Amino acid sequence: MNRIKIAPSILAADPVQLGEELRKIEDAGADYVHVDVMDGHFVPNLAYSPDIVKGLRTVSKLPFDVHLMIEEPKKYIETFVKAGADIITVHEEVTENYAEMADFIHSFGVKAGISVKPNTPIERLENDFDKFDLILIMTVEPGFGGQSYIESMNEKIRKTRALIDESGKNIELEIDGGVTVENISEAVKCGADVIVAGSTVFKADDVNAVIAEMRENAK
Ligand code: DX5
Ligand code: ZN
């Protein structure tokens, strides 16, 4: 297993000190900044606009992993790329043609990801998952931070890992929601290699220590 990537979700960061929070995770060796975008339709919550992403871009060198939980992602992809996104992930549930979506995202020069909600079977992606650079398995219902990890998603992670390995392609397998220093171990054993963590990272007293502990437990 390669070294896992840690992608702290700024949904759980202190909104009054976002710049400082980003510096903290960069110093602690985070790999990506996970930015949740919510439109109040696809999920019952609202989060980060392109302007915020643009502002944050000036204080961080980390890749921005932008998770679009919105109904009409195509309308906003270019705007988020211009604001500084490095990876754009859209949801399967609002994507009709996977290959076309992947091409569309790639046409802006960034990596493309596709995400599945807990009740969306990974089999839906079977024929076209390899058009993407990243597959994001939601391990909670999207919309809010601080929820509990859905243990039954471990089986989905395992299946997805098998698909990726069979394809022989370099596709990242990201999980998002409810990851803790305790349950990270099993998720990584099942095959996850990019770990989003909001509350676990940002609500910790010592961000350096918690990221180190996550890495240790993922070995
Ligand atoms: C949920 C978001 C997650 C969320 C994770 O819809 O996609 O990225 O911020 O937060 P935690 O790690 O607190 O569950
Ligand atoms: Zn997310």
Image (cartoon, rainbow, N blue to C red):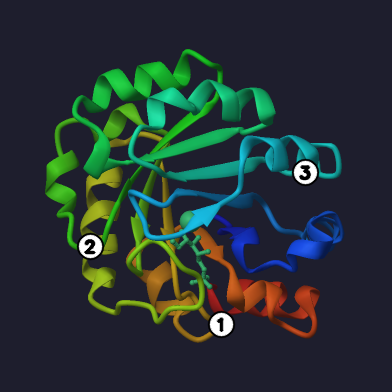
Pointer 3 or 2: first along the chain: 3
In the picture of the structure, the residue carrying the numbered disc 1 is 181
Picture quarter with the C terminus: bottom right
* 213 w.r.t. 140: above or below: below
Ligand 1 contact, mark 3 (Cβ < 8 Å): no
**x, y percent for residue 103:** 37, 17
**x, y percent for residue 191:** 37, 61
Q: Is residue 105 left or right of residue 207?
A: left
Q: Nearer the viewer, residue 161 or 103?
A: 103
In the picture of the structure, the residue carrying the numbered disc 2 is 156
SS for dot 1: loop
- Distance in Å between CA atoms under marks 3 and 2: 33 Å
Are the residues flagged by discs 1 and 2 in contact, CB closer than 8 Å? no
In the picture of the structure, the residue carrying the numbered disc 3 is 56
Q: Residues within 10 Å of mark 3 (few under 14, many from 20)?
A: some
Q: Quadrant of residue 205?
A: bottom right
- Residue under the image location 70 percent in, 79 percent down: 210
Q: Residues within 10 Å of mark 1 (few under 14, many from 20)?
A: some
Residue 207's tag is: none
- Residue under the image location 66 percent in, 51 percent down: 33
Pointer 1 or 2: first along the chain: 2
